[in-house]
Amino acid sequence: MEILGNLFYGLGIALSPENLLMALIGVVLGVAIGAMPGLGSVNGVAILLPITYAVPPTSAIIFLAAIYYGAMYGGAISSITLNIPGASTAVATTFDGYPLAQKGQAADALVTAAVASFIGGTISIVLFTFFAPPLAEFALRFGPPEEFAVVFLAYGTFAGLGGESPIKTLIATMMGLLMSTVGTDIVSGSPRLIFADITGFYHGINFLVLAIGLYGVGEIFYTLEGGMQARERYQAKMGIREIAATIRDLRRYTTTLLRGSLLGFFVGMLPAAGATPASFMSYSIAKRFSKESVQFGKGTIEGVAAPECANNAASTGAMLPMLTLGIPGSPTTAVMLGALYVWGLVPGPRLFIENADFVWGLTGSLYIANALAVLVALFAIPFFIWMLRMPMTILAPVILVVCAVGGFSPTQDMFDVYLMFFFGAIGYFFRKLDYPLAPMVLALVLGGLTERTFRQSLIISHGSIGIFFDFSGHPIAATLMWLSVATFAVPVISYFLGKRRLKF
Amino acid sequence: MRLMDRAVAAVLFLIGLCVAWKSTELPIGILPKEGPGGGFLPFWLSLGISLAAAGVFVQSFFGGSAEGEGADAPAEEPFISWESFTDILRVGIPGLIMILLTSTISIYFASAAFVFYCLFYVGRHGLKTSLSVAVGVPIGVFFIFEKFLIIPLPKGFAEPLFYLEWGSFF
């Protein structure tokens, strides 16, 4: 009952006019960014994060969460109309969405995507409301070794699910961690890794500079490579009557929707898994259990509903470990986690006690943003289809300017803008060569925590690594450490055995 | 593709060694009372990067590289075609110039010039579209960042222009 009280309190915060406005703007921007080919929620959140400096943290997280939500809806729009996934989370939506559009049922597919997203989001938010507080309470008992083990588990799962090559994931993770050590040594306070005596290194490498560089500048380079012309597209007509008919039709797929939403939530909760694997899993499971499984891939409503409900459910699921344990469940939440530190909040169990209005305001706003997103997605579809006509030659320079300003804002140092551009080049090469980007951002965000907990633990244990594997003294830490070693080992072993890994 | 894979691995290997050398400025061992020294993590991480990069390099000679091409894979695809490369450079180089000029001629003039160049010369949009976007972007940036967020952006020689209270005209 206490949870319900908190929830109503949170809804009250979320419904205040300024927060409602933030949610609305966020949702509209999110849908627009999600619909742009190549740009997804993580790009949107990274590029627009500097805008949140002027507002209180609660409004800021509401804004970012709304972008996250909106992008999940928006991704489906370009998947269906252009056969170009707006984001990786919407790749599975192209399988049946585009064939439907070719058959002239683009409007049905778009409405299905929006409604399925709403259902997935709603189920997931309810689960979030009831799961988060107990998990946070449990995590309150964690000391440095346990905290280190949780962070280590995050790295382990990223290696397990990150990219194609485990060794490249390892390199990306270590590079992120290495970048986090630039600046000042946290224990002795002496300057560390100040290359060529450049003063810009003294304040450390800001995670935002890396995130905007990799996901903003690098992504633009990557998209430019695909050519700068606008593509042909299908027109979709939308009216109240079409919408209502499609929704009535969707009732046939209640089990698919329920299964996809639950699956999405729990897969999203796993560190690093996020919405992309969730949508693929939901699609393949729906296909396996469907009575019309031969229709999958040729354009069936069920094939759009399954991945769309799962990716939205997963985006909420991914926020749960971010808030309760301080480890992100997806690349986007990794960027949001960095934002929390920027705002001076410490993610983790204490957040629920010390910043209750932040946590519950966010929870409340998830309900609101979800409802807003379905409305925006349904009624603004013609507008977004118009917007997709905007060629990359207009979008690319405008986004580059926004990136430059965004890279400058956190530290107001031009050196960071140069660094950001350099990271953009790295991001381009890494993407082309299958180095995963998310582990690098995650490691830079969590680097400070990793080093602090690691060194504190070793001070406690007088320099023995054994403290992390000691079942009698720190059972939770030891369990988590062995679990991470296992998640780390699985891809490596299967890689050397030459077996194809489970592909989502 | 494979050549680039090797080149990047080699560069990472060298960077790893350089940073490892750099991190010896602080103690890299485990100190008796304080636990690991300030150089401990950076040192071992950069050595780890070198080691892993060497692994990627060696791996690229054996069929099972990251792209999953076997030894009998068809003709090697190039890392990037010349046309795509020029497409990137035609926006990337002006972008770099914009960033380098920002501290001297202000973000406003630099971004207007950059946006205009990209739209008019690269994208071949009409003069009207190009001009309106090129003027609109800096104005938008000014109101969002300078006025709403109160973040002073680099203005260079254009600084005196901002002594006027532009915001008060609207």
Image: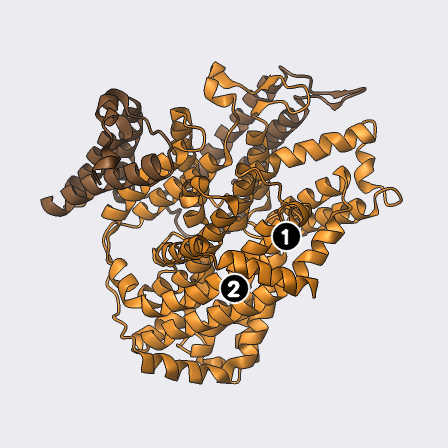
- A107 over A163 or under it: above or below: below
Chain bearing tag 2 is: A
Chain bearing tag 1 is: A
Q: Color of chain A here?
A: orange
- Residue A255's x, y, as percent? 57, 80
Q: Quadrant of residue A258?
A: bottom right
Q: How is the image coloured?
A: by chain
Q: Color of chain B here?
A: brown
Residue A321, which numbered label?
1
The residue most toward the left is B127
Classify residue A282 as left or right of residue B89. Answer: right
Category of crowding for the residue at label 1, using alpha-carbon neighbours closer than 10 angstroms: few (below 14), some (14–19), many (at least 20): many
Q: Which residue is mark 2?
A: A367
Q: Amino acid at mark 1?
A: Pro
Residue at point 42%, 37% (across, down): A213
Q: Quadrant of residue B30?
A: top right
Q: Which of the image's four quarters has the N terminus of chain B?
A: top left
Category of crowding for the residue at label 2, using alpha-carbon neighbours closer than 10 angstroms: few (below 14), some (14–19), many (at least 20): some
